Amino acid sequence: MEIIEIKSYPVWIGSRNQLLVKVETNEGIYGWGESGFSGRELAVSGVIDHYKEWLVGRDPMRRGSLWQEMYRSQYFEGGRTLTAAISAIDLALHDIVGKKLGVPVYELLGGKHRDVVPVFATTPGPYGPEMLDQAKEFMERGITAFRLSYDAMDINSGGVFEPRESIANSAEWLIKARETLGNQAVLGIDYHHRLNVAETASFCQMLPRHTLDFLEEPIRDETPEAYEALRRMTDVPFAIGEEFASKWQFLPYIERGITNYARVDVCNVGGFTEAMKVAGWAEAHYIDLMPHNPLGPICTAASVHLGAAVPNFSWLEVNLQRADKPEFDVFSEQITLEGNSYPVPNRPGLGIEVDETALMTEFKFWEPPHPHRRDGTHTNW
Ligand SMILES: [Mg+2]
């Protein structure tokens, strides 16, 4: 079998751009992948064009070897842009191999550990009674793990984010949430790297013990030593890793015990080939995967196969607003949420079908908000 074509589709679907990748073979078998480098999709599409130059004519069955060649075939190896492209191609190659062998992708990853993959959801509303009602609704549908809205102030209009005001308000509503929802609920919050070490420590000190079950990415991740310093100042578990673009970026976080949930993203880390290595490494340190899954149905399907194939797994992220309205006009075959989990599909490959004619919509340039403090300095989106 030979690869004969690689197409990338950076297209606007629903309310956002997605970068989908299709790899075609001379046997008529094809596979789909998705890139996770949201917001800069055209850069990844350019990388895929470079890889296509030499991937055409290659054997897709040799996916592990092709991963190495993609990662190491340029002088400037690694980095999020390159690995996002490698991720999409690696997922598509696994889809092809599964279809060729007539088995679902989880069989290629070691076989099934579970029949359903449980999810965690995020309350969409702002802090207030509405957020607590949304959390209660989640629990009524059986979803017991969730992230609560973080206090974004008017950040979603590209506006102001003031850390002190945010952590004070967050603490107040998180304490109310724990009192209201009880100890059965798993409560987390994602701070999108918007705090510094001292602010995060103050925030954690505002919370009575066992208010939070996990704190996701309170500070930026370039410096593991900063997280180690923070680790000494709080015992709240950390959930880190959605932007990591290789096992090497996970290395200090796993080996030094500074992440407690690995937020691996199959569309960023390097596809299944790299995610399975992170999973084994995390297993050795008794760390569960809590995969990042903010993209489209291909990312979800890939994450479900990953979740099925590893023993150390907590919950898969789900966007309920999108999961409750599957886009069947684009993804005619996909994995749909049932209650509080995704059933593990048994179709060969990923279990995804895409209507290519629905991908003829134009790419739309879109900028995430550029949040700032009142003094004008910038912080992270
Ligand atoms: Mg996050």
Image (spheres, helix red, strand yellow):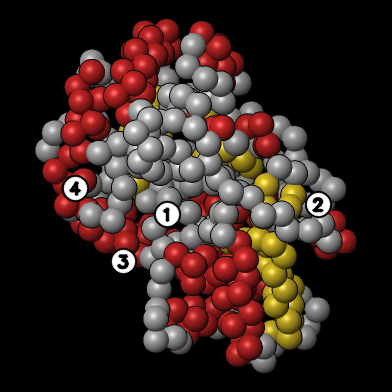
Quote the CA–CA distance across marks 2 and 3. 35 Å
Label 3 sits on residue: 248
Q: Give the residue displayed 49% in from the left and 60% down from the top.
A: 268
Q: How many marks?
A: 4
How many neighbours does mark 3 have within 10 angstroms: few (below 14), some (14-19), or many (20 or more)? few
Q: Secondary structure at mark 1?
A: loop
Label 4 sits on residue: 226
Q: Give the residue displayed 38% in from the left and 30% down from the top.
A: 374
Q: Secondary structure at mark 3?
A: helix
**Is 76 drawn above or below residue 261 in the view shown?**
below
Q: Can you tell me whether the CB of the residue at mark 2 lies under 8 Å from the nearest atom of ligand 1?
A: no
Q: Secondary structure at mark 4?
A: helix
Report the amino acid beneath label 3.
Trp
Q: Is residue 379 visible?
A: no
Tag in front: 2 or 4: 4
Quote the CA–CA distance across marks 1 and 4. 17 Å
Tag in front: 1 or 2: 1
Label 1 sits on residue: 243
Which quadrant of the view contains residue 20?
bottom right
Q: Position of residue 262 (x, y in %)?
A: 36, 48
- Left or right, residue 321 beside residue 356: left
Q: Of the numbered discs in the image, which one, if any, rests on residue 49? A: none
Is the N terminus in the top left, top right, bottom left or bottom right quadrant? bottom right
How many neighbours does mark 4 have within 10 angstroms: few (below 14), some (14-19), or many (20 or more)? some
N-term-proximal mark, 2 vs 4: 4
Label 2 sits on residue: 330
Q: Position of residue 348 (x, y in %)?
A: 70, 63
Report the amino acid beneath label 2.
Val
Report the amino acid beneath label 4.
Ala
- Left or right, residue 108 beside residue 31: left
Quick check: marks 2 and 4 in contact, CB under 8 Å? no
